[in-house]
Image: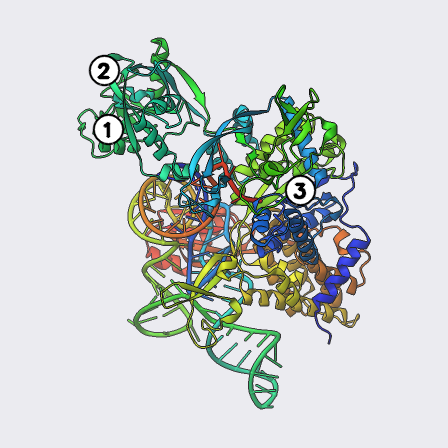
Amino acid sequence: MSRYTPAEIEARWQAAWEKTETFKAVRDAAKPKYYVLEMFPYPSGRIHMGHVRNYTMGDVIARYKIATGHNVLHPMGWDAFGMPAENAAMAIGGHPKDWTYGNIADMRDQMKPLGLSIDWSREFATCDPEYYGQQQALFLDMLDAGLVYRKNAVVNWDPVDMTVLANEQVEAGRGWRSGALVERRELTQWFFKISDMAEDLLDALDGLENWPAKVRLMQENWIGKSRGLQFAFSTVDAPEGHDRIEVYTTRPDTLMGASFVGISPDHPLAKALEREREDVAAFNAECRRGGTTEEAIETAEKMGFDTGIRVRHPFDTAHELPVYIANFILMDYGTGAIFGCPAHDQRDFDFATKYGLPIIATYLPSEDSSEDLAQAYVPAKTETVYYNRGFAGEAHQTGIEAIDAAIAFCEQNGVGQGVTKYRLRDWGLSRQRYWGAPIPVVHCDACGVVPEKKENLPIELPYDVTFDTPGNPLNRHPTWRDTPCPACGKPAQRETDTMDTFVDSSWYFARFTSPRADTPTVMEDADYWMNVDQYIGGIEHAILHLLYSRFFARAMHITGHLPAKAIEPFDALFTQGMVTHEIYLTRDANGRPVYHLPEEVTDGKLADGTPVEVIPSAKMSKSKKNVVDPADIIGAYGADTARWFVLSDSPPERDVEWTASGAEAAFKHLSRVWAISERIAEMDESTAGEGDEDLLRAMHRTINDVTLGIESFGFNAAIAKLYAFTATLQKSKAGVAAQREAILRLAQLMSPMTPHLSEDIWSRHGQDGLIVSAPWPTADDTMLVDDTVTLPIQINGKRRSEISVPADMSKEEVEKLALADQAVIRSLDGAAPKKIIVVPGRIVNVVV
RNA sequence: GCGGGCGUGAUGGAAUGGUAGACAUACCAGACUUAAAAUCUGUUGGGGCGUAGCCCCGUGUGGGUUCGAGUCCCACCGCCCGCACCA
């Protein structure tokens, strides 16, 4: 008997799909469209199991949607700009462009054997001038629409390499190459006005019903809408022009507990003092050490500097508070200045304790509570507390009520006003790097900052650059910067900053609808294919990429590049987990870990018998030697096995651990299905059988369960049902007609996961056409209902017995039967039951 | 530090608030075989007793809601993701 040979089968069916252009997406008004998209990959050079899992999930959806009569768009491209290409050029020489396109070619070659239903005719890379030229056009339109502007912002500055560092290039406050202590330095940069859309981006989250609730919540918190009071303290002994300090607070009800005012080291007053006073300059310099991330700032030791300046309390001008410069106050949020209320904020409490400032409670749990606090008293805003120093509202009220009352009181008395603020900051898109889309503007001595003319696009990156010294090669290129001013024609200089790679990935989904057009999009295509019906990618993109894409879709609508319906570009979102693998390690003489490849380890030991430590479920990483190369798996077992396994072993939103035994098992299972198919194909046509009805009932049940499983992303559960049905079919003694029906439906149900094997079975049994084009099987509802059901009987909520009853038996009769059950009689011991709960078709619970 | 999530046998996991552990791995046993591999079949959460049966415990820890909680609520512990220049 012949054997399951995936290498041969898979090549054959991939050729067949290519020949018939099965996956080429063409607009067809007669069919419902379906756009499925997985987050496109960065072309690192090798695909990994995470990619296989991500694209297989999308492929299952795409193939299922094809089978259910949809016109499916399933494209693929490359997120091709970014730092790794420049790092490679620095580390191993060569050019980012060559490195990137080489990687793309390699990865495409590794992806094609997976048999994905991708329309490769739409492929593009974000580093193609055809793509980033259209992106430059979008930028100019957004500039024109007032959605782009320039302002100063801080960057990580490496004072030795004299270059800007990315956050990931700052390790423990030092530059990764130079080892120098990093400083925060201001630079003029380009920004998208995403904060203008904060309210809409927040409100529209409610409409994203098919997004995970956790992602919507994360975005809501990121946008961070708050209602508070903005007011000014008048200053005493401050430099000229600083007679007021504007502060913003979300807790105006604690105003009577204010014991200091804190300003950011980047606050205009701090900067003014810095120019005149060495001690302030030294403190501010100290504060500016370290990276720019919020994490670095918030975890740094809290430091304050008493400026000697005082402010007057707005309710009691005789009462003066000290003004501190504090390293934990962000200039980007609010006004860059706060008042500290140590009694009700742990950070302020620690600060007050450190600098000997008073701790004044404004509210307490009750009237007889002590005012001496060992730590900040921070109850939930919904809790009712006693205001011992309240000035607005009731003595007993919740924080929410007190805040509203305080804002109203302050507005009436001319102390500031209630304002709404957002945590969301504008999106800085400038990067002082080569391998990105050039920002298409020109700096002219006479005209200032001038947008490039659209007919001059794309502004292409020069190829003749070197990476032997740190910094942006565009800055030191001999001629690239020189260009006539688009306005006056006199010699001028190009902007050398390039765009953040998040810009590239914020509209690629729209470009896929008309990837070769000489405008960013074509309205007819965008209107037909948008929105993305199902978007699939990693949870790590929950905030930035998805929020930026939502902003960009709105901006593209405003500038006429997307229809109104596409301002929320992703109708449904699914966030999938990682593929992990055990790490095997031993220790060297100094106790440092030495990692070992999986193939070096058998039964927990190395070849020489040394036992290894095993770390389970670890993210795949080359340095930890726990990477499994999909090419090796496809070579050994075929793509269908790899696809089947990555879906079978864990729910798709969770991590899945790659195990050699699991892959082996997947392969065995597919071999078994293939063998069953062969056996049925060779059955004598006249063979009579028994149990046709049972087999067909199981088949319809499986059609139902697998369909629901695919539609709800329950791929692992769907696969469990397919395992079970395969076992049923294998043991079945049914006649040839029923068995043939069963194997054909099984092949169809498996086809989204194992498309090659399914095509092979389809053709082996003489079916016309390709299985990929065959309509999805439907379950016969009458075959799904059983005549009798088994009801578990609980006594006090614990299962003690069960009864078998007709499915349509009345509650009363079920109750009678339950009371006649031996276990129930025994526990009742002659007494009457307190209560009987009968849930029809589910359970009986007797309370004794 | 802040925001979000997750936690179930030896392992991955299943379970619209209704029989916890489906399905798979691993292990063990059996069939076939001279033998092994392959294949097939079966057992397996822990503990106990008077062992065809029955009882107790069990979904990170502690509490709560409910006739009934892996599932809902609160607190804690551990791990993971994000924190605006990694992609």
Q: Examine the rendering and report whether any part of residue A21 can be seen.
A: yes
Q: Chain of mark 2?
A: A
Q: Chain of mark 3?
A: A
Of label 2 and label 1, which has the lower sequence position?
A: 2
Q: Which residue is situated farthest in the front direction here? A: A478
User: Do dots 2 and 3 share one subunit?
Assistant: yes
Amino acid type, residue under disc 2 in the picture: His
Q: Residues within 10 Å of mark 2 (few under 14, many from 20)?
A: few
Dot 1: element: loop
Residue placed under numbered mark 2 in the picture: A319
Location of residue A408 by image quarter: top left
Alpha carbon distance from label 2 to label 1: 26 Å
Q: Examine the rendering and report whether any part of residue A250 can be seen.
A: no
Q: Are the residues at dot 1 and dot 3 in contact (C-beta closer than 8 Å)?
A: no
- Camera-nearest residue between A745 and A693: A745
Q: Are the residues at dot 2 and dot 1 in contact (C-beta closer than 8 Å)?
A: no
Location of residue A245 by image quarter: top left
Amino acid type, residue under disc 3 in the picture: Cys
Report the mark closest to the observer, 1 or 3: 3
Amino acid type, residue under disc 1 in the picture: Pro
- Answer above or below: position of A637 versus A172: below
The tag on residue A127 is 3
Alpha carbon distance from label 1 to label 3: 60 Å
Percent across and percent down for residue A602 are: 49, 73
Q: Residue at x 34, y 35 (%)?
A: A286
Alpha carbon distance from label 2 to label 3: 61 Å
Location of residue A820 by image quarter: bottom left
Residue placed under numbered mark 1 in the picture: A365
